[in-house]
Image: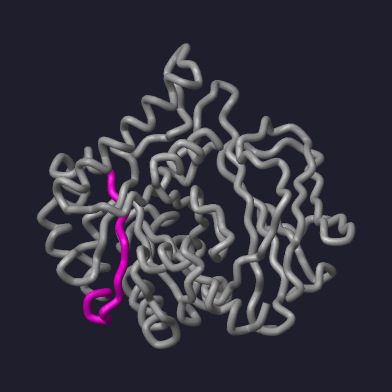
Amino acid sequence: MSNKTQAADNAVILLYHHVSDATPASTSVSPETFQQHMSYLAEHYNVLPLKDVVVALKNKQSLPDNAVAITFDDGFKNIYQNGHPILAKLHLPYTVFINPDLVNKVNYHLSWDDMKNMAKQGASFANHNLRHEHLLTRLPDENDEAWLVRRITDIQQAETLLEDNLDVKDKFLAYPYGEFSPALQARITELGYVGFAQYSGAIASFSDFSALPRFPAAGIYANLDRLKVKIASLALPVSEVTPVSPLVDGNAFTFQFKVQSDDINNRQLSCYFQGSSQPITRKSEYVSVSFAKKLPVGRSRINCTAPSISQPSRYYWYSKPWFIPTSEGKWLD
């Protein structure tokens, strides 16, 4: 794959929540830092509407080099108060994933009027489920089918509210907490949705459009020097990933995938889990990492990266998330 082709078939999606100094640090970026991020993007990148990025990649159409999309989850009012003025001044498009059941009911959430005003200056809005809940949570004695019907009903109701109030028709769904399952992925795909998760990585035409990765850019991930490496990343083409599901029982297992790119040297590929480099077994095009201990409760992920041969300053990036409930079957916030 040529340099030009790689650039044309690649984009990065950034994920924010709060733009504020007074909200939880783990999901917040200060207005000052957000200004730095956006100024950097405006100067060095092609910031595109999320819809343009998704449509181009799904249809295997070329994107401009350095394509980036900006997203927010949860629809907090401080996005309008502190983030929107910066984005509007720089003429940067962005998408906010909202919980429609909270609109006009809680004072920390955007109102429909807020969103209509934002939409006049480059904002678009999309589905973050009806309420901000763990979609993997089940009711007592709820079977697989009943659980899936209940969750899809909420997603569809949220989409209807978005269409009725904002004329949204894109069918983009960001999973609350970034949590999803193969059953959810399959059903939303059948219904014509594109899914967005919260694990890291770039996207390309070969990405899984039922759970696209986004790079978190707030909290501990807000440092611009480190973020620059991620924004410049390339989607690593992989196949034959095992285990496929992000739902594992937490016991020891081996994670494996096949690298399908002649632009990386497998010997330079590294995988990281919870900040530590992991021993890798390489066999031809296959890479495997063994986990001898149980995975921790909650959300975790392994990140695998390798420098591009043709563009040494850029890294290929592939991430795999895992979701582990508590012994009582609860999902951590």
Q: How many marks?
A: 0
The answer to whether one can see residue 131 in this image is: no
The answer to whether one can see residue 89 in this image is: yes
Q: Is residue 27 above or below residue 268?
A: above
* Residue bounds of the magenta highlight: 87-99
| Quadrant including the N terminus | bottom right
Q: Picture coordinates of residue 224 (x, y %)?
A: 49, 76
Q: Picture coordinates of residue 325 (x, y %)?
A: 57, 31
Nearer-the-camera pick, 129 or 251: 129
Q: Picture coordinates of residue 21 (x, y %)?
A: 32, 63
| Quadrant including the C terminus | top left
Q: Residue, x 43% and y 35% (percent of image)? A: 134
Q: Is residue 24 above or below residue 91?
A: above
Q: Is residue 220 left or right of residue 155?
A: right
- Whether 190 is among the magenta residues is no
Q: Residue, x 31% and y 61% (percent of image)? A: 95
Q: Residue, x 59% and y 79% (percent of image)? A: 5
Q: Residue furthest right?
A: 283
Nearer-the-camera pick, 45 or 57: 57
- Whether 95 is among the magenta residues is yes
Nearer-the-camera pick, 53 or 227: 53
Q: Picture coordinates of residue 299 (x, y %)?
A: 56, 43
Q: Is residue 175 left or right of residue 7?
A: left
The image quarter containing residue 315 is: bottom right
Q: Is residue 302 above or below residue 144?
A: below
